[in-house]
Image: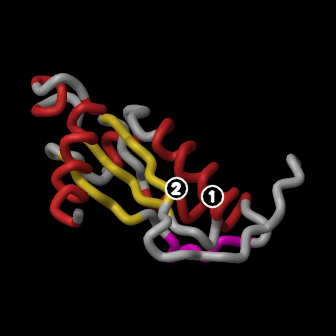
Amino acid sequence: MYGVPVASLNHTGNELGILSLNNWLWLPDLKDFFRNYTSPQIPPDVEPEYISIDGGKRGNRSEIEAGKGRESALDVQTAYSIIYPQQVRLYQIDDTTAARAAGGGFKALLDALVSIFIPLI
């Protein structure tokens, strides 16, 4: 629809990071999306690398039925549609617990990234 060229390269270590705050991705919906709406079709076994921060969890049916998975699903579906075969990392934060008490989900993400990457320097 937008004339985005089909991507063909995948460079490990250059994954697209997506932040999800208390809004959980439901993987069965992602597989349905790939099957029904991607061209060329993304294989159904493709899923983002999942990184839990401060209690972030994977989606479950009850949360999805309550409408808590829409934003995360849209972010991941859109990203994969544009950049596949490049991979996606989903940083999942439970913003209702420790993250909120510590100053919000974005601060929790920055703290986690610092703890991951500073030791590598």
Residue 116 image position (x, y, % from top left) = 21, 58
Q: Are marks 1 and 2 in contact (CB under 8 Å)?
A: yes
Q: Which residue is disc 1 drawn over?
A: 33
- Residue kind at label 1, given as amino acid type: Phe
**In this orientation, which residue lies closer to the viewer: 16 or 38?**
16
Please provide the residue range marked out in magenta: 41-46
Instruction: List the residue tagged with mark 2.
Output: 29
Secondary structure mostly seen in magenta is loop
At a point 17% along the width and 25% down the height, the residue shown is: 100
Q: Is 63 left or right of 84, judged from the image as shown? A: left
Q: Quadrant of residue 105?
A: top left
Residue type at the position of mark 2: Asp
Residue nearest the viewer, comparing 22 with 99: 99
The image shows residue 1, relative to residue 8, as above or below, that is: above
Q: Position of residue 16 (x, y in %)?
A: 50, 57
Q: Does dot 1 land on a helix, a strand or a loop?
A: helix
Q: Tell me if mark 2 has few (under 14), some (14-19) or many (20+) residues whose alpha carbon lies within 10 angstroms of its own.
A: some
